[in-house]
Amino acid sequence: MHISSINVYDAKNIHDVLNLLDKEPGRWSILAGGTDIMVQLDLGTWQAPNLINIWGISDLSGIRINKNEIEIGALSTFSEIINHPIIKKEFPMLIEAAMLTGSIAIQNRGTIGGNIMNASPAADTPPALLAYGAEIELTSKNEVRRLFYKDFHINYKLMRINQDEILTKIILPRTSNKTIDFYQKVGTRAAHSISKACIAVRLTMDKKTITDIKIGLGAVAPMPIRVYMTEDLLKGNKLSMDLIDQAILQIASEIHPIDDIRSNKAYRLRVAINLLRNFLKGLL
Amino acid sequence: MNTQKIKIQFTLNNQETIITTYPMKRLIDVLRDDLHLTGTKEGCGEGECGACAVFINGELVNSCLVPIIQVDGTIVSTIENFASDFELDRIQESFINNNGAQCGICTPGMILASSALLMKNANPNEQEIRTNLAGNLCRCTGYNKILDSVKEASKLIRKK
Ligand SMILES: Cc1cc2nc3c(=O)[nH]c(=O)nc-3n(C[C@H](O)[C@H](O)[C@H](O)COP(=O)(O)OP(=O)(O)OC[C@H]3O[C@@H](n4cnc5c(N)ncnc54)[C@H](O)[C@@H]3O)c2cc1C
Ligand code: FES
Ligand code: FES
């Protein structure tokens, strides 16, 4: 689609956005930092002729620290997240993911809401959000609702969002428990390259028993996923080489990587397995 | 059907600038084609190479990824804003002294990315330079001379 046929509504505040989505649901798409949309426009793959520009709407950005949770505005850039001291302290995997997302110039412009909504299976922040048990806030003119992020992606680029809704917040639950985080992205080049596989784990341990664990994965399925059966197998059990072997068998049957230009199925499966095994072995 | 052109007003290299164009026109095309500021280069057109870097409100961005509607009301600064009529910027000087440029296509972006780094960290180590320039590709120099250039610029900046 050529730029001369794209119509942009320059929203001044969130009410503008919600009113328009309410009046003409399905007609409008959101333009945030544009780092995905502009590339698709250039490649000729962008199809939506009507955009609502939300860049600069302050109600949609900003990070708020509450007693039990942290609220991140969907329009917050990766750079804003990277520079936040409390996120750095309590949610280091999100910082790591943001720092691995493109270059500084991309981090200054790309938003976390755009990263989620673009719904690439290989995006870097979703595995971290999954491992942290994040929630998201979706807003329409008539309703503000919350959803666990783990339930948001249904299939490739298919999400539980209505046509009159916009993603407004990402919510991270704070905890005072002692937790262990593990994040690793495997790609061809450190900065910039799109993941071939990506894993994020948060767990709590009591002596050698795993008391809680969440495992988020990227690039091993048509969308970012948790591996619930592997988590259940590990949870409540004492860590041992035998348990790790069982977990590896389980995760191998639970994920379904794809072949694409960046990598193939077998390689992705191997990488995901190795990442989990090495991490768990390090805890023995 | 064509959409309507809109009026965009912004400060470009300290000058009030007004332009009427399509809202999704890329900033790089406005700079190069409409305003004839050709210092900003286009390499990949997809955000990967950093040749098109500019500052918007003091932040480093790739101008091939910024639609002009998002430039309205901002302050934009390009490579043309670095040297005065009489004097080169210290980063530019260092690139010349160290042969940090060959064909020169990546150089404006390299200089802007270096400037963004040196403004927040006047004394970066080699790893910090590499991380901060990771979004800038060069097909000619092999990068070592660019690293040398940034290191010298850092010294010059700290001296003054
Ligand atoms: C050179 C380059 C390197 C990159 N590297 C990486 C990388 O390493 N890892 C990675 O994960 N990504 C990477 N990306 C992808 C991109 O930067 C991210 O996905 C970014 O987070 C998108 O955010 P945005 O604000 O720019 O989105 P936009 O381009 O503005 O929008 C993206 C999509 O999300 C929708 N959308 C945006 N915000 C909302 C909202 N609040 N509510 C509803 N819908 C919304 C838009 O309609 C659109 O469909 C890279 C991109 C480039 C150009
Ligand atoms: S031309 Fe903009 S990043 Fe390459
Ligand atoms: S000098 Fe030619 S691309 Fe860097």
Image: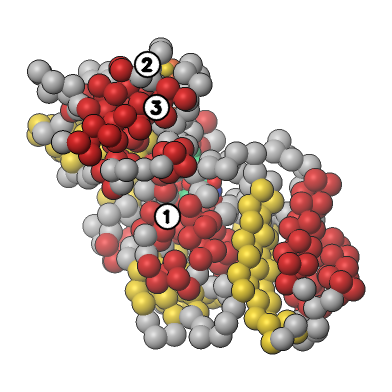
Q: Is mark 1 within 8 Å of ligand 1?
A: yes
Q: Are marks 2 and 1 on the same chain?
A: no
- Quadrant of the image for the N terminus of chain B? top left
Q: What distance separates the C-alpha of mark 2 from that of mark 1?
A: 33 Å
Distance Cα–Cα, label 3 vs label 1: 29 Å
Instruction: Tell me the element at label 2.
Output: loop
Establish if A67 lies above or below B42. below
Residue B10, compared with residue B142, is above or below; it is: below
Secondary structure category for the residue under label 1: helix
Q: State the quadrant of the C terminus of chain B.
A: top left
* Numbered tag placed on residue A7 in the rendering: none
Tell me whether the residue at label 3 lies in contact with that at label 1, contact meaning CB atoms closer than 8 angstroms.
no
Q: Mark number for residue B148?
A: 3
Output the chain of dot 1: A
Q: Quadrant of ligand 3?
A: top left
Percent x, y of residue B30: 27, 27
Q: Which mark is residue A78?
A: 1
Q: Nearer the viewer, residue B151 or A202?
A: B151
Residue drawn at point x = 22 percent, y = 18 percent: B36
Front position in the image: A61 or B153? B153
- Answer few, some or many: residues within 10 Å of disc 3's Cα (few below 14, many 20 plus, some between 14 and 19): some
State the image coordinates of residue A116 (x, y, percent, origin top left).
Answer: 52, 58
Which residue is drawn at the image coordinates 40% and 61% (left, top)?
A: A81
Q: Is residue A242 left or right of residue A86?
A: right
Question: Which residue bears the numbered disc 2?
Answer: B99
Residue lying at 69% horizontally and 87% vertically, measured from the top left: A206
